[in-house]
Image (spheres, rainbow, N blue to C red):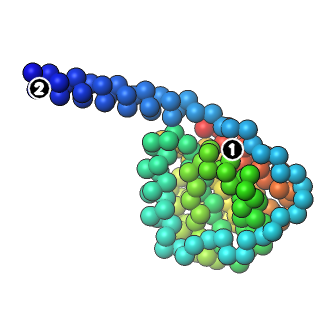
Amino acid sequence: MRFLKLGLCLTCCVALAGVMSEAAMARTMTTAPVVGDDPVHPVVVPYPVPEMAQAQLQAAIARAKVSGKPVLLDFGGNWSPDCWSLSGVLAIPAVSAWIAQNFEVVVVNVSRRNTNLGIGENYGVEITAVPSVLIVSSDGKALNAGTIGALSNASKMTPQSIVDQLAAWGKLN
């Protein structure tokens, strides 16, 4: 009898896991916030020490496998005004809440484009400008490989155009 209960329990767990993964795969983006075109306050030191990138990436991938959310990898350097601008937009409360609902985020410090570049190469992309944003599906596929540099001139873009680009990439999942 004990083995029958254990077998039933395992069967239910496997079935539930299948339902959860199907739900994660079927997730859709929530509506992007409207933030307008007002100037934002740049974040001057948005990237953590480069040594943290691999551990943060592994944690985000593990979370993505459970949540079904794509992983947003933000490659940049603390010396870049465009990175400061992108980080300022991502720090807007409505945007940061929306990002948290729709993506697992990894902020990757590439220093002066000489560190952590292998992370992008692992997904078939070359980081040639910062910021570069790579969206990776929860099953590990690069979704926007041809357009990772679209936000590399973020300091000249409106906050709304940045959010709109992120939303378009999020729909690729």
Between discs 1 and 2, the one toward the N terminus: 2
Residue found at the very far left of the displayed protein: 1
Q: Which amino acid is tagged 1?
A: Trp
Q: Which amino acid is tagged 2?
A: Phe
Q: Residue at x 72, y 75 (%)?
A: 44
The residue under label 1 is 169
Residue 159: give x, y in percent of width and height.
83, 56
Residue 78: give x, y in percent of width and height.
67, 76
Which dot marks residue 3? 2
Say which quadrant the N terminus sits in: top left
**114 vs 158: above or below:** below
Q: Residue at x 81, y 68 (%)?
A: 41
Q: Residue at x 24, y 27 (%)?
A: 9
Residue 14: give x, y in percent of width and height.
31, 29
Q: To which quarter of the image does residue 114 belong?
A: bottom right
Name the element at disc 1: helix
**163 vs 29: above or below:** below
Residue 54 vs residue 37, the one in the foreground: 37
Is residue 120 visible in the rendered structure shown here?
yes
Residue 85 vs residue 40, the one in the foreground: 40
Name the element at disc 2: helix
Q: Residue at x 67, y 51 (%)?
A: 97
Say which quadrant the C terminus sits in: top right
Q: Is residue 6 left or right of residue 132?
A: left
